Amino acid sequence: MPDYHHHHHHHHWREKDSYAYRAGQPGPGPNFHRLRRNTRRGKIAGVCAGFAEYFGWNLKWVRVLMILATIFFFPMPAIIYLIAAVFMKPDTDLPPQTEFRDPETERFWRTFSTRPKATFSELKHRFRALDMRIADLEHAVTSSEYGLRKAFHDLERGA
């Protein structure tokens, strides 16, 4: 007989390295989406790659734009690049797990970093919808009809 009460995917919060276990402690949270120099994909210092990764832009076009800006507006883009290279943290000091669990989680954190008001609004609507569903469940479970249906169901099963 299958075990209907086993939900393996809901127990990850009990693991000692999970965010729920470390909540409130200093250190990185579940959001790995930070503006950093991407030294793995970078050609010089990883500044263009870092901006492309952070904003979800195509790296090739960021580099082309940077080259054109440097040609037409020299020396300002070069100076800005050097300042960014000095002040942006490299991605080498990130914890080992820097990938998001799934695309939905990545989309949430990217939106949270770039548009927090939109993310807050989306969360508010989701929680409101969940609250309405819970209220419907509470109403169904506490109604007298629920007890009657459960009794009939138990009789049908022979309990």
Image: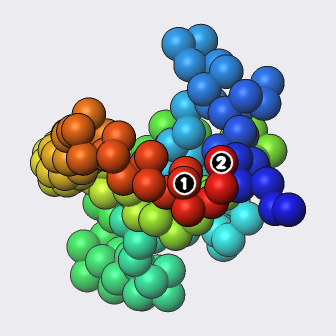
Q: Which residue is mark 2?
A: 159
Q: Amino acid type of disc 2?
A: Ala
Q: Say whether residue 50 is visible.
A: no
Left or right of 88: which side holds 100? right
**129 vs 48: above or below:** above
Residue 13 lies, in percent from the top left, at: 66, 33
Q: Secondary structure at mark 1?
A: helix
Q: Say whether residue 63 is visible.
A: yes
Left or right of 93: which side holds 144? left
Residues marked 2 and 1 touching at CB (< 8 Å):
yes
**51 vs 89: above or below:** below
Q: Residues within 10 Å of mark 2 (few under 14, many from 20)?
A: few
Q: Residue at x 31, y 57 (%)?
A: 111
Q: Which residue is mark 1?
A: 155
Which quadrant would residue 93 be assigned to in this image?
A: top right
Nearer-the-camera pick, 146 or 156: 156
Residue 125 lies, in percent from the top left, at: 15, 50
Q: Secondary structure at mark 2?
A: loop
Query: What's the CA distance linking mark 2 and mark 1?
Result: 6 Å
Location of the N terminus by quadrant is bottom right
Nearer-the-camera pick, 143 or 58: 143
